[in-house]
């Protein structure tokens, strides 16, 4: 055991997506300390791979927090009570890029920024895609564009800053490795 323990928290802000709290902890030496913590319901994302096994479908959308449009894999927060992560990923894939995945394979789970936020994300690989209707849900989604990118281009896109979103970099790197493994079989 780490010897750290949480003693309590006080809500500072409760918003539509996140809750910010001042939390009190005790370290292994018995010293009390405080941290601001952001509680988030969690999120899912999908790397949708077209039938050629080399091309992925991404979205370019405005992100208010960084005041820029980012190129990302389709994603969304867990905002439907009781919805399984895989079901949420399937829903987001349909809503954002208009595809249903015949197969969703979990690639990884990770904390986006554990230094201040408890958001836990799950990224899936989406295979055997079938086109369906796009169902944009928010203002950013109504204005986003869909782009196709070759997986071979991903390392250069990360290196030169065309890809800056962490879940996208993680998802695409893991998808490249997983698809390479599948081709070797």
Image (tube, rainbow, N blue to C red):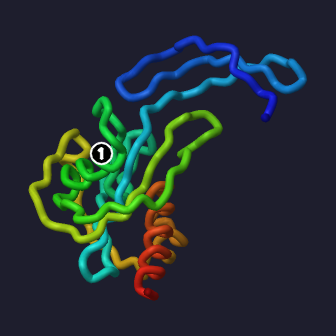
Is 181 situated left or right of 89 in this image? right
Q: Is residue 85 above or below residue 74?
A: above
Q: Is residue 75 above or below residue 100?
A: above
What residue is drawn where x is 42% and y is 55%? 123
What residue is drawn where x is 26% and y is 74%? 50
Is 73 or 85 nearer to us in this picture? 85
Where residue 124 appears, as percent x and y from the top left, is 39, 59
Is 48 or 12 nearer to us in this picture? 48
Q: Could you tell me how many numbered marks the image carries?
A: 1
What residue is drawn where x is 30% and y is 37%? 83
Q: Quadrant of the N terminus?
A: top right
Where residue 16 appears, as percent x and y from the top left, is 35, 24
Where residue 11 appears, as percent x and y from the top left, is 53, 13
Where residue 56 appears, as percent x and y from the top left, is 32, 71
Q: Which residue extends farthest front?
A: 185
Residue at the spot of label 1: 88
Is 184 or 160 nearer to us in this picture? 184
Circle 1 Cα neighbour tier, 10 Å, few/some/many (<14 / 14–19 / ≥20): many
Q: Which residue extends farthest right?
A: 29
What residue is drawn where x is 32% and y is 61%? 104
Q: Which residue extends farthest bottom?
A: 184
Q: Secondary structure at mark 1?
A: helix
Q: Quadrant of the C terminus?
A: bottom left
Is 143 situated left or right of 152 in this image? left
């Amino acid at each position: 055991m780490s010897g750290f323990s949480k003693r309590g928290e006080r809500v500072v802000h409760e918003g539509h997506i996140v809750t910010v709290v001042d939390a009190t902890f005790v370290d292994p030496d018995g010293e009390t300390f405080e941290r601001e913590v952001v509680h988030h319901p969690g999120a899912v994302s999908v790397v949708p791979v077209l039938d050629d096994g080399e091309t992925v479908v991404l979205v370019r959308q405005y992100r208010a927090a960084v005041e820029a449009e980012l190129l990302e894999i389709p994603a969304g927060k867990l905002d439907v009570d009781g919805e399984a992560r895989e079901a949420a990923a399937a829903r987001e894939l349909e809503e954002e890029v208009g595809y249903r995945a015949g197969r969703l394979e979990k690639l990884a789970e990770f904390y986006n920024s554990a230094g201040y936020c408890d958001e836990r994300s799950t990224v899936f690989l989406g295979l055997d895609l079938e086109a369906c209707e796009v169902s944009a849900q928010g203002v950013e989604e109504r204005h986003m564009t869909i782009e196709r990118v070759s997986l071979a281009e991903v390392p250069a896109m990360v290196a030169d800053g065309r890809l800056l979103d962490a879940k996208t970099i993680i998802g695409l790197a893991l998808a490249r490795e997983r698809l390479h493994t599948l081709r070797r079989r």
